[in-house]
Image (spheres, rainbow, N blue to C red):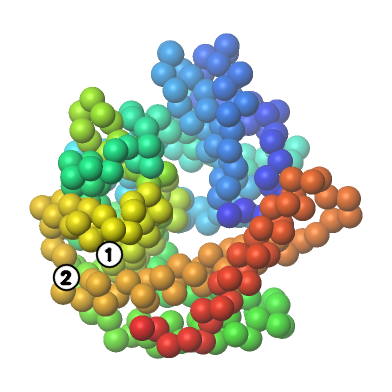
Amino acid sequence: MIKLKYLFNNTDLAEMLLQNWSYDADSLDLFQYYRISSNAIYPFRFEGNTRLLRFAPQSEKNKANTLAELAFIAYLKENGFNVLEAIASKQGAELIETATPWGNYAASVFKRVPGQSFDQADFNAATLFVYGKTLGELHRLSSTYTPKKHRRWTYEEVLDWIEEELSAFPEETAALCEVKQLRNYFQTWPVSAAHFGLIHYDFECDNVFYDRETGLCHVIDFDDAMYHWYAMDIYAALESLQEFIAREDWERKKQHFVDGYTSEFVWNVETEAMLPGCKRFDNLYSYARVKRAIGETWHNEPAWMMQLRSRLEQSLKEAEAFFGKEIE
């Protein structure tokens, strides 16, 4: 997530950035449905169709990473994968960087995908199969993908970033030891086109939209994409599904997901054994991002910010409980 100071609603900024694209002037009332986490997302319409303005301070993003994200999305689209589509600006660029009264910002616009987020779907055999099939198809396409110019960062570079961010906090000795432990742990994992490639990283139910009319899934939000083991995406998907499926139904319904996945890509024998390591990586990465986001404090913070800070501080305590433990 981005720093807390960037979580304020700013429709003036959104409208200023949106001037780089065509839009229906009477649709800006949709800005009221904005959301902000890793980016600010403001919906609007163009020719009656919903589109999404995504922006963030340039200081919060890596330009090469963003360009690599857009290139990967374009590759997936060209190969028939159901993915969100970036819209070129009036200047012909999918990524706009510009100075504003609130600092330098980077912005892009995407078409809204059809359907509703998967957490609103029926978790039956057919939908779970297509959810797994969609992830398998993504990994199959990733396994043959070679970037032409910009390349997303790797899990190793993410660990470097975590180490750099946490080094600013002298008390973070346990978290820094966790970085070292994971580096050593991942060195034993197989690196092949069947195991490792460019992943979505956040393949959760709210980033996958299910279209009831077509029975297909559409994937959004590649903002966290990185080179990692495909098992990382599988971990995220299964972890998300467990929130919505009763324990007594889990193994049976999980198999529908696995069947869908294997209809498109190989389910490696090592996959299940990799999931605990993926959980630890996700735990540490989330910890570092939250630590960075709440690093600054101010007098007389608004109530919503104090409440959010309290929840995030509690999440840090929960994450710390895993540091230094053996990865099972």
Q: Earlier in the sequence, mark 1 or mark 2?
A: 1
The residue at the far left in this view is 263
Residue toward you, 65 or 263 = 263
Give me the residue at 62% from left, 69% from top.
316
**Residue 188: quadrant of the picture:** bottom left
Q: Is residue 235 among what the camera can see?
A: yes
Give me the residue at 19% from left, 68% from top.
193
Residue 74 locus on image (x, y percent):
30, 42
Few, some or many residues within 10 Å of mark 2 (<14, 14–19, 20+): some
The residue at the far right in this view is 299
Give me the residue at 16% from left, 74% from top.
269
Few, some or many residues within 10 Å of mark 1 (<14, 14–19, 20+): many
- Disc 2 designates what residue? 268
| Left or right, 279 with reference to 317 | left
Residue 228 locus on image (x, y percent):
34, 68
**Residue 59: quadrant of the picture:** bottom right
Give residue 249's mark. Answer: none
User: The disc labelled 1 sits on which kind of residue?
Assistant: Tyr
**Residue 230: quadrant of the picture:** bottom left
Q: Are marks 1 and 2 in contact (CB under 8 Å)?
A: yes
Give me the residue at 52% from left, 14% from top.
24
| Left or right, 99 with reference to 85 | right
